[in-house]
Amino acid sequence: MKKTKLIYEGKAKKLHETEDPDLLVVEFKDDMASLDGRKKGVIKNKGIVNSKISTYIFNFLDSYHIPSHFEKSLSDREILVKRLEMVPIEVIVRNIATGSLCDKYGCKEGDSLQYPIIEFYLKNDKLNDPMMNEYHAAAFGLATPEEMRTIVRFATKVNAILKSFFIRRKVRLVDFKLEFGRFKGQLYLGDEISPDTCRFWDLETGEQLDKDRFRKDMGRVEEAYQEMLRRVLNL
Amino acid sequence: MKKTKLIYEGKAKKLHETEDPDLLVVEFKDDMASLDGRKKGVIKNKGIVNSKISTYIFNFLDSYHIPSHFEKSLSDREILVKRLEMVPIEVIVRNIATGSLCDKYGCKEGDSLQYPIIEFYLKNDKLNDPMMNEYHAAAFGLATPEEMRTIVRFATKVNAILKSFFIRRKVRLVDFKLEFGRFKGQLYLGDEISPDTCRFWDLETGEQLDKDRFRKDMGRVEEAYQEMLRRVLNL
């Protein structure tokens, strides 16, 4: 499938149109940004790691009947995906209290949550991605109540599937972000699933194996990403 | 019913124990505060207005089978209520976009919402009452999923009932706050329903007839509260 036109370039990914109007090419970059883009860096081969991990996970989820935009891998850092009409909502699923959750609600860092927490954030840089809920989604015309119920069902199922998957890889799935979009009247999981969008802690040592190493200047970011790739692929 | 012990004094209300461990006396004060208590004032007879409006509304809601803590009126500014174990969540119901909703989501001031918005805030001054949802409620042990569903059902019903009630009084119910609590294993509506906890706009002129007059230094606060009392009582 030939790339025809670059239609989006973000912090970590480029999107290209193809000859098929229903399909896009996602190109994973090595660039890394945090603090709304105020902190920047390059992590060698991050794009390759994220492309391969996302490919593996989307295929794995497909085997559990979770529909995603993923079609096939094209190269080390490119995947072919369905062209979704994105729902402008970030869905966060949390199993362990850390990060902004603890700042905001005063819960103890590292505590296992009695029940998983699902949060919704409006994707809007200018408004600083405010937290929202299913009633805002309906009132502002972002997603129907039925779509929000589907999103919650998928998010809950993805969490259950991936929690066990990562335990087998000796990794705790602390929290992660999902995005969804519409394609021919149906909802699909979009975006990526990678150390950029998940928090992974080593099951035994608690070592952080994700983007937090970059956010917190902990060093050995590249090594952590490579380690996560090895674990996902079971090498 | 004799008051025995003052157990709580807030910005706008005092709570007293009585000889019956299941019952409290709520005393409505004339004191007014906003901006987390940084702005203070006294509105003459506000306590009387809020006591009488709450009494009327709780009775009215009771006729629609919405259970509340209200037992009976004791004096101009005192009501007898069930002693609830409060759920530490503020429930906001919005019909028209205004105030913090517009700041946060960039919607247009004064727009009617296509569907009512229900929002939940953790009652915690130290954490600045962060927005939350039913998953936080379950994970932090604040309320069970079933209780949250009951709260949504009550809030939706109260909104439908009061929207029509106030239209007949030539008032738009813009938004309002509810609080709930447990009593002998059941959920009850608690707190108050008054111009302190609702936004009321005159149906024809759009004039604000609520606490926003105090928040925004618009003047004629006492007159607005008296006008709302007249309208509620249909005088």
Image: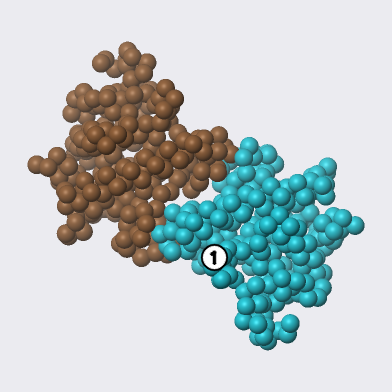
Chain colours: A brown, B cyan
Residue B61 rendering spot, x and y as whole percentages: 72, 57
Label 1: state its secondary structure. Answer: loop
Give how far across and how far down residue A150 sits, in percent: 42, 38
Q: Is residue A136 left or right of residue B158?
A: left
Residue at left 62%, top 40%? Answer: B115
Residue placed most toward the observer, B168 or B214:
B168
B208 shown above or below B15:
above
The image shows residue B91, relative to residue B112, as above or below, that is below
* Quadrant including the C terminus of chain A: top left
Screen quadrant of the N terminus of chain A:
top left
Q: Report if residue B215 is visible in the image.
A: no
Location of residue A75 with respect to B185 vertically, above or below: above
- What chain letter is assigned to the residue under label 1? B
Look at label 1 and name its amino acid: Val
Q: Position of residue B192 (x, y in %)?
A: 69, 64
All told, the count of numbered labels is 1
Residue at the image point whose x is 83% and y is 42% from the top: B204
| Residue A76 position (above or below residue B181) | above
Q: Residue at x 12, y 42 (%)?
A: A234
| Residue that extends furthest to the right in the rendered view of this protein | B235
Q: What is the x, y in percent for residue B194?
A: 73, 61
Q: Residue at x 65, y 72 (%)?
A: B82
Residue position for label 1: B87
